[in-house]
Amino acid sequence: MSRPEQRSLHFNLFIHDTGHHEASWRLPESEPLAHIDVAYHQRLARIAEDAKFDSLFLADSPALWGDPGRRPSGRLEPTVLLTALAVSTSRIGLIATASTSYNEPYNLARRFASLDHVSGGRAGWNIVTTAGDAAARNFGLEGQPTHAERYDRAAEFIEVSTKLWDSWEDDAVVADKDRGVHAEADRVHRFGHVGRHFRVDGPLNVPRSPQAHPLLVQAGSSEDGKDFAARYAEAVFTAQPTLEEGQAFYADVKRRAVAAGRDPEGVKILPGIVPVIGDTEAEARELDAELDRLIQPEYAKLQLATLLGLDPDRFALDEELPSDLPEEDEIEGSKSRYTLIVQLARRERLTVRQLIGRLGGGRGHRTFTGTPVQVADTIQHWFEHGAADGFNIMPAVLPSGLEVFVQRVVPILQERGLFRTEYTGRTLREHYGLPRPANRFASTLVGA
Amino acid sequence: MSRPEQRSLHFNLFIHDTGHHEASWRLPESEPLAHIDVAYHQRLARIAEDAKFDSLFLADSPALWGDPGRRPSGRLEPTVLLTALAVSTSRIGLIATASTSYNEPYNLARRFASLDHVSGGRAGWNIVTTAGDAAARNFGLEGQPTHAERYDRAAEFIEVSTKLWDSWEDDAVVADKDRGVHAEADRVHRFGHVGRHFRVDGPLNVPRSPQAHPLLVQAGSSEDGKDFAARYAEAVFTAQPTLEEGQAFYADVKRRAVAAGRDPEGVKILPGIVPVIGDTEAEARELDAELDRLIQPEYAKLQLATLLGLDPDRFALDEELPSDLPEEDEIEGSKSRYTLIVQLARRERLTVRQLIGRLGGGRGHRTFTGTPVQVADTIQHWFEHGAADGFNIMPAVLPSGLEVFVQRVVPILQERGLFRTEYTGRTLREHYGLPRPANRFASTLVGA
Ligand SMILES: Cc1cc2nc3c(=O)[nH]c(=O)nc-3n(C[C@H](O)[C@H](O)[C@H](O)COP(=O)(O)O)c2cc1C
Ligand SMILES: Cc1cc2nc3c(=O)[nH]c(=O)nc-3n(C[C@H](O)[C@H](O)[C@H](O)COP(=O)(O)O)c2cc1C
């Protein structure tokens, strides 16, 4: 048992093919078809579970992003892949990204409820609004809805989803064979939602799941994104390049949560970090550099342009970004990512080539480079100085980057009493110390 | 190895909670929470796989059907549940029902491609248009689109889905680390579909899967349904109450397939049968009667009314159906099911109570009641007299009804050389003797 009074770190494993680094697939050790290989993902999940990680996570977009030529692209749909992992693990949480812009609440709420049943209460949903026109054009649209419109739909999407998950009360199913009553019909609710984006009668066709709702995770950091997080999210993934920015973001989201009437402890902030670990600091730096040499700059430039929503011909590899870039409020794609990248480039006066090097490894997430103790120290420092409740661990290369982290950094943090040595809970919510939601439709018990 | 020249039976297991019979959940042996229990489904899948069944199958609708009070209702979403089964089996095919009326092709095609990857080529899709207003009202509509409109959308849905599955050529992924080329970009196609119902740019974000396309299964038997089957389906589930009707249906669908320019062998016809097996014929009949006694007639009357789309107050339990029912062409729900039930009641002059008894066990599917040899004989007779290429096995009670069938009937059919004793193929298509589809976008090799 861990001491409940002590605040504990939370770790989420970000799984992205052979690693978060653009060029990781080109390393001799990397499995070329990892991205469509279930056994590979099962291996990663088991390593993270053996290390007592809270959860693992899959990013997603309903479109092929970028040029399939240059890195693994196209992969298994996250709710499907996580179901496969649910069956081959027993404790680790399973967080799938899914878009509120290109799904229907009924279909998606069902799949998360089903995954929660299959996993015994380990499902989480990374709620994204999906930036970019490519996805929109797979769903009947010419281009993406505006940023504000996407977040407006996202909010109603969550309202509808939580109604669907609440539409079966916990004690609805009685399975009384003698009376021939399987469920008490008055504890199954047809709520009849009618809103600006959705009309959904209900009830859901899945009985209430172990966690009641999947853990709600969010990863947008624009103003709208932070307000959305403050209202709905229970965990927030974020890219914070410096401690100071991390602290400001942390304080900002917690403050917004309080303003929205919530317990700030109910929103866990998890910055992404790319750990690059060596026996010496120099060795760690060499590892980092080796990967950057595998990046193909012309292709990366194209990706950068797509990410920023700008014309690639306006960039030159050995010059800084053009000075007349649009402001964040003119951006309809991923606002916070745009600002983060542009600010990083300006602050450090990086050429496009240098910027690409920085993004190849971390894409704006913070790279923690050093010896195991140095990396553990930095984690502890962020955790104890108001920048993080835990971390989204994004190894540059998989599985090796994960293996090094769990073998060399995790034990240090466990020794310091900062990270669990055994799971104490069964569900994903229990791992994060978050409550099981009450049911809005539950009958009030009069005189009971 | 089976002798390839000999035609072989195909068996699909229809899994529906504790069995196809309305009241099966009330038996002492039945697991009350079977419908949301993965381990229960894994057990069934293994029994069917040990018996060398071609496939198993899950029905589905994106709505809660009927009154949740009276039988298990609400269950796990099929693509999720089948993924869990994919990981715990190795040979049996996995067929999920999914609606073309209430999904987007991009999302659904992805999930089937993903399931096909996870299962190593064992995914099948039972394509349904979903009758009834309840589902429509979970997706922003007041009521269901017309029957014709649903089939029109279904046809375009399949066109788009097959384009998505073809959007990656088989040899697109090269994973050439030295050149830094993961896929040959000119073998990944953005096809830009624009039609009456859908606009989808592509490509899919899943590389081509083992079977290329999941097996396409269909289960509508109206005129539109049969035309649809003839154009697209590779296997057809159907409810045929008598041998003669089965023969007529079989000939009709094969004829339509030929008219559509297809090989009639490429469409397998699988009538549903409910085997009720006893050591003696009398024992089998007693088993049947025992289940019918557990049916709750008032509730069943309500369900019947819903199924027929009629007012329940127009029925009396101990009278025949009213004589002034609408004709099939006035029905916008499930046309063929409507006609089948009404004809059955008229032909045998059944009261509503008697009709309910017949439907409780088979819902219009044929019940094969008798000793193991009698049931095997009837199967062989249908198979050899132009009524079936195989059967959709719908046990009234699960798992016991399946166990009796595989222990007592399957060995007889194997002995007669009518059913495999070992799997000879790896994929679902191989089990059914169906080809892997060619790729419409594959580059023509000039001079190769
Ligand atoms: C760690 C992390 C993971 C993310 N994963 C996804 C993802 O899988 N899919 C996606 O569409 N967006 C993803 N995002 C982007 C955000 O969810 C969000 O859509 C984007 O930042 C735009 O929102 P904003 O303008 O509020 O920042 C991720 C962001 C972070 C920090
Ligand atoms: C064995 C069998 C299984 C079926 N399963 C489903 C199902 O899971 N979901 C569904 O909506 N319809 C299902 N149906 C109904 C048909 O797919 C079809 O939607 C219905 O019969 C209406 O089409 P029709 O008017 O062309 O007959 C099934 C039919 C049969 C014979």
Image (cartoon, coloured by chain):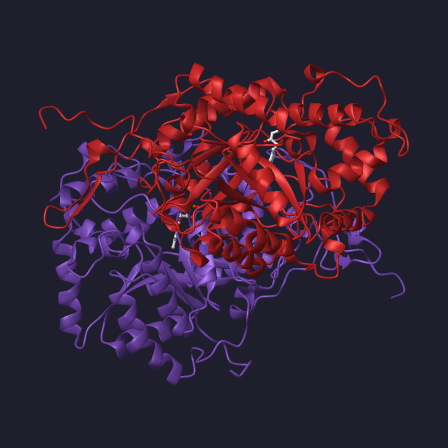
Chain colours: A red, B purple
Q: Is residue B71 left or right of residue A391?
A: left
Q: Position of residue B340 (x, y in %)?
A: 32, 50
Compared to residue B39, the image places residue B426 above or below, namely: below
Q: Is residue B291 left or right of residue B256?
A: left
Residue at horizontal 16%, vertical 76%? B280
Q: Quadrant of ligand 1?
A: top right
> Does residue A443 show up?
yes
Residue at horizontal 26%, vertical 77%? B372
Compared to residue A100, the image places residue A67 above or below, namely: below
Q: Is residue B209 left or right of residue B97?
A: right
Foreground of the two, A65 or A295: A295
| Total numbered labels placed on residues in the image | 0
Foreground of the two, B301 or A391: A391
Q: Position of residue A145 (x, y in %)?
A: 63, 22
Foreground of the two, A71 or B392: A71
Compared to residue A125, the image places residue A254 above or below, namely: above
Q: Position of residue B147 (x, y in %)?
A: 45, 37
Residue at horizontal 15%, vertical 59%? B28
> Does residue A198 show up?
no
Q: Position of residue B337 (x, y in %)?
A: 35, 47
Q: Looking at the rendering, in which quadrant would you find the C terminus of chain A?
A: top left
Q: Quadrant of residue A366?
A: top right
